[in-house]
Image: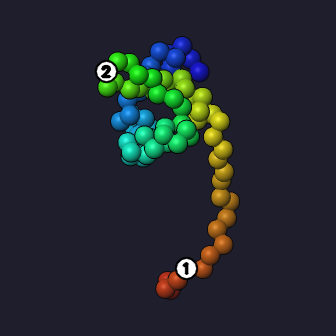
Amino acid sequence: MNSLSENLYLSVDQVAARFGVSKDSIWRWKREGDFPAAVKLGGTTTRWRLSDIEEWEGQLVCGFVTSLDFEPVGMTLG
């Protein structure tokens, strides 16, 4: 995390775009407690600290598929 990310705040639109999901998904993740806490900046303005998002991303577990074991249906080759 760098000092720039500590001072940047993302809107729900920006957070949704970052993860390729809908805004509703971001609000649901927040409600369910599966996402970093948002910051109220006043009135109806809610933002997420980029540093919190980056820290959360660093804790995510990911995996890679090394092979797929399936038979294509309805395809003929050659």
Question: Residue at the location (63% across, 34% down)?
Answer: 58
Residue 17: quadrant of the picture: top left
Question: What's under tag 2, amino acid-wise?
Answer: Gly
From this viewpoint, is residue 19 visible?
no
Scheme of colours in the image:
rainbow
SS for dot 1: loop
For label 2, count other residues whose C-alpha is less than 10 Å away and answer few (under 14), some (14-19) or many (20+): few
Considering depth in this image, is 10 or 37 the residue closer to the camera?
37
Label 2 and label 1: CA atoms lie apart by: 54 Å
Residue 39: quadrant of the picture: top left
Question: Residue at the location (63% across, 40% down)?
Answer: 60
Q: Which mark is residue 62?
A: none
Question: What's under tag 1, amino acid-wise?
Answer: Pro
Q: Is residue 43 above or below residue 30?
A: above
Considering depth in this image, is 18 or 29 the residue closer to the camera?
29
On-image quarter of the N terminus? top right
Give the image location of residue 61, x and y in percent: 66, 44
From this viewpoint, is residue 34 visible?
yes
To which residue does mark 2 refer?
43
Lower sequence index among marks 2 and 1: 2
Give the image location of residue 20, x and y in percent: 43, 45
Give the image location of residue 25, x and y in percent: 43, 46
Q: Which mark is residue 72?
A: 1
For label 1, count other residues whose C-alpha is less than 10 Å away and answer few (under 14), some (14-19) or many (20+): few
- Left or right relative to 13: residue 32: right
